[in-house]
Image (spheres, grey):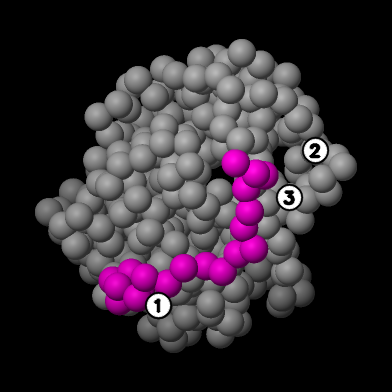
Amino acid sequence: MPQQEEQEIHRLLKMFLVMFVISRKEDEVFSGASPSLEGIAAGRGAAADTARYFLKETERAGETPHLHFFEAAVAYKSGQVSRAFAAFDQARRLFDKGWSAYHHQVGAHSIRPVPEFLGAAGQGHEPSADFAFDGARRFSADLPVIAIGVDQGYYDRYAPRWIKAAEGVANLHFHVANPDPARLHSGDNLRYSFETVKTPSPAYFATMRFLHLHRLLERYQVPVIVSDADAFLSGDPSILIKAACQQDLACTVSAGFRDCLPWRHLIAQAVMARPTDGAFRFLACFRSLYCHVASGPQGPQWWIDQALLAATLAVLREQGREPAVLCGRILPAAGLKQGKL
């Protein structure tokens, strides 16, 4: 077997071991009050075998991202966010030096140590955007507001399905990057905002709805549900708005192996925000963290939207300014399902 292919297989196996052990051997990993790799390695079972393997590999081959990633994931799942973010950052630095990141590891590019994030939040930087509303028109009917961020290509693909399903059910606000006005639909329940993106990237397009959500809350002064473009309406979104009437935000929290990774923990597919001080505080912090991460040499990377949802909550919690967040199965409560075209 060629050496490069063998190294790739080993890399994937290491990532699998991290995710498998933490999600399937929780009783072994989290048996102690404050789990550490050394503590896990001193035990018995698959978790102990895996921890010993990573520790021995580091002794043999020197520093690799895999041990840091294992430590970070264990710490995050056990609620030790500062320790987790510091270890994810160590793994990120090795990825930046040339180590390959597996799909689920790419989110580490958007994590920084908590003190660094706290400093970035204090800077209050705002992303620059050529943003404009489509005039001063408001919605003509009092219906739940759903916002979708897309480029023109995604608009062409998904907008017709949204528009058909939303008739009499919801008001739709499309934020369109690099739009072609001649290809946009019109209707009493349709409103738009636009921006010009000079260096398009999927990571930015996935994140821009959160970067502009405060503008929509200020304009409409009602709760706004932001959704992935490839979701679709299949129910009544007002159910979520009523369920979260006492909260600033509502979001989906994942379970299983995903809750050991910040960027797989809070899911961005559907998030609701109300025009409250807590929501505006959350969104302002999110924008500052985005500016800090995206200004790095790598620019915005995939998973940055979900990584920064979790990081923003961690920063505000550290500051004692955490908003009220309803966590649950938000997608069905919002009357939405996921389905690509």
Residue 23 point in image, percent of width and height: 38, 44
Q: Is residue 323 visible?
A: yes
Residue 296 position within the rendered picture, expressed as x and y whole percent measured from the top left: 53, 79
Q: Residue at x 36, y 40 (%)?
A: 275
- From the viewer's perspective, tell me whether residue 235 is left or right of residue 223: right
Q: Residue 238, labelled with which disc? A: none
Nearer-N-terminus badge (3/1): 1
Q: Is residue 133 magenta?
A: yes
Q: Nearer the viewer, mark 3 or mark 2?
A: 2
- Left/right placement of residue 178 relative to residue 234 reads right
Could you tell me how far apart the alpha carbons at marks 3 and 2 are, in whole angstroms? 12 Å
Q: Is residue 46 left or right of residue 331?
A: left
Are the two marked residues, 1 and 2, in contact with CB atoms closer than 8 angstroms? no
Picture coordinates of residue 273, whole percent (x, y): 40, 39
Amino acid tagged 2: Leu
Furthest-right residue in this view: 182
| Viewer-proximal residue among 271 and 104 | 271
Residue 167, by quadrant, is top right
Q: Amino acid at mark 1?
A: Gln
Instruction: Give the mark toward the camera: 3 or 1.
Output: 3
Question: Which residue, given by chain and number where applicable, does mark 2 sit on?
Answer: 184
Q: Residue at x 18, y 49 (%)?
A: 31
- The residue identified by callout 1 is 90
Tell us which disc is closer to us: 1 or 2.
2
- SS for dot 1: helix
Q: CA distance from mark 3 to mark 1?
A: 34 Å
Which residue type carries mark 3? Answer: Asp
State which tag comes first along the sequence, 3 or 2. Answer: 3
Q: Which residue is mark 3?
A: 151
**Span colored in magenta:** 117-136
